[in-house]
Structures are given as C-alpha cells and as structure tokens.
Amino acid sequence: MHAFDFTATDDVDRALRLANTDSAFLAGGTLLVDLMKLDVMTPKHVIDINGLNLRGISVNHNGLRIGAMERMVDVATSSDVARHYPMITKALLLSASGQVRNMASIGGNLLQRTRCDYFRDVRTPCNKREPGSGCPAQTGENRNHAILGTSTSCVATHPSDLAVALVALGASVRLRARDGVRQVELGSFYRLPGETPHLENQLRPGELITDVLVPALPWARRSTYVKIRDRQSFEFALTSVAVALDLRDGNVHNARIAVGGVGTRPWRLPAVEDALRGRPTHEHVEAAAALATVDARPLAHNGFKVTLLRRAIMRAVMNLAARR
C-alpha cells in the first residue's frame, strides 16, 4: 500500500474543498481499502466522510429518498422500502455478506469497481486500470465477464446488485460539487466502456453522491430481484434480474426490467418490457425474454449466460405474475 494523507471531516463543504483528482472519499471502505492494499487505487489523500450528515430513508408521494451514507443493512431492513420497493430490499439482502452490509454505504455500493481479476492484478494489463494497456479478458479467462455493452477495450461486468434494481425503477443520484448540485438518472450515470473504460460514470473529480432518489411507482410493490451465482453467499452474479410488474385482470399493462452480471453497466431492457404486455403465459414470456440477448456478444467461456439470462427473466416474471 502506498503512503497517503488522511483527513476526517463532518462538514460537506470542507470535504469538497479537500477533494481533487488525487483524492478518494472513504465511506464504508469495504472496497477502497482492498484496492489500496492491492495498489489498484493509489490516492494521495483519503478523506473520511463518515461524519457527514448524508443519511435518512423516507418514502412519500414523490417516491423514496436514501441518503448516500446510509448503510446497506439499514436500507435492507427498512419496512418502508420493503413495502413500496421490495426489489431494492431483495437486491441488498442478496449482496455481499452480513458483515459487509453492516459497513458498506449506499453511495459506495453504487460506485464500486468491477471484480474482473485482470483489473485487480496490477501485474497484468487492464484498460480500465491503465488506459491503452490492453484487455486480456478478451481471449483469456472470461467466464464471469459481460455479454452486453462490451467493446474491444473492455468486457468487465458491473458488480452492483443495488444499481440493477435502481436502474429498473428509473432512480437518480443527486451529486454535489463546490459549484453546485445536479441530478443524474442512474441509467445514464454509468458509461459504456467504448474506447475509454477507465471512465466508468458521470461523476466529476471532487463530486460527491449525496442522495439516491427513486420516483413513486405504486405497482413496484409487485417486484422482485432474482440472482443466480455460483454459491449462495458472498458471491457476485452470473446473472441477475430486477422486475416490477403492473398486473391487472391477469394481464401485464407495464413492466420494468433491468439485469446484472451480464452487462458492462446495469442493463435496462425496454424491448422486453414492451413485449411483456398482455397475458403472461409461458410462451409469451419466453418470447419476450428472448429479446434480452439479441445484441449479446458472448466470449469463449461465457456463452452459457445467453440461455441463463433468458431463463432468469422467465423465472422472475412468472413468479411475480403468479403471486396473489
């Protein structure tokens, strides 16, 4: 681990004044500390923001607001969140481990870095870590890598379960910098890798996530999150599906679907959403789910994700449609 300066503050304005391109904010630290130990991230200045008043969980007629410094466990155990947005609760409870959920912040979860082994190993090339150095996952070990949104520069998956649920719900993040506040929809906050995979999101240097805002969506009470992984605890998704259904008189009138574990960012599926309208028979849902992989580009070891994704979507939708 490289040497660094450390400052703790309970004042948002001071935290923003201290921040620059060589600094990093420390919230839960469940990933930052790991990557600093590996020399993947080498900030010269670490700013501890645990004292900032960026907390709170509230639901009203406008929707849900979550402070960026809320711990994952507190959001996961919120009765209001579980009642109005069960897919968020399930996504959080299927994330990481109990110990990590006790420490990790909501803002930090949304900004976590990929778990690609090449990214985490400084002895290997990685365009995300060192632009222009190459992407060995293209021809190397790529079983866990993306099949949607990839480029010749990067095929790493986005790791956050929570982000998948939030993208499905049309959530936004509120960002604060020295010169003001702005709000960005989460679906466009994350960048596709293209030729610049090191630019992972729209966050500007010295900018801080302060809140997550989820719009009101009454029929999101009928929602779920399905995660398929190699083991049942503390494992990242091979594929995951966040689904909300507007089901009336046995017909799907509207749907929200996003998937994880298969994309370079949380992946919304508007074509599948549109195709699901109507009676959710097995054949109808199967045809809709097939649209999810029209643009898939599987690699040598992850072609199984094409079938797995379709079946995961079917499982999530059929289970929700059958729920009374």
Image (cartoon, helix red, strand yellow):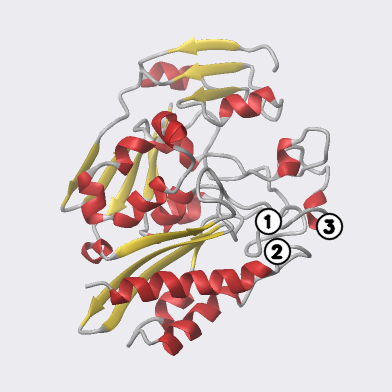
Q: Is residue 208 visible?
A: no
> Which is nearer the N-term, disc 1 or disc 2?
1
The structure residue drawn at horizontal position 57% and vertical position 57%, both measured from the top left corner, is 261
How packed mark 2 is, by other alpha carbons closer than 10 Å (few <14, some 14-19, many 20 or more), is: some
Q: Position of residue 315 (x, y in %)?
A: 44, 72
Spatial separation of the CA atoms under disc 3 and disc 2: 12 Å
Which quarter of the image is occupied by the C terminus?
bottom left
Residue 54, x across and y down, in percent: 32, 29
Q: Which residue is mark 1?
A: 145
Residue 65, given in percent of the width and then of the height, sits at: 27, 43
Label 1 to label 3: alpha-carbon separation: 11 Å
| Secondary structure found at label 1 | loop
Left or right: 35, with 209 as reference point: right
Q: Amino acid at mark 1?
A: His
**Mark 1–mark 2 distance (CA, rounded to whole Å):** 7 Å
Amino acid at dot 2: Asn
Q: Determine whether, in the image, residue 151 is placed left or right of residue 275.
A: right
Question: What's the residue at 57%, 28% (across, down)?
Answer: 32
Q: Relative to 268, say whether 79 is above or below.
A: above
Quadrant of the image occupied by residue 257: bottom left
The tag earlier along the polypeptide, 3 or 2, is 3
Q: Which residue is mark 3?
A: 139
Q: Residues within 10 Å of mark 3 (few under 14, many from 20)?
A: few
Q: Which mark is residue 302?
A: 2
Describe the element under mark 3 as helix, strand or loop: loop
- Check if mark 1's residue and mark 2's residue have beta carbons within 8 Å: yes
Residue count near mark 1 (Cα–Cα under 10 Å), binned few <14, some 14–19, many ≥20: many
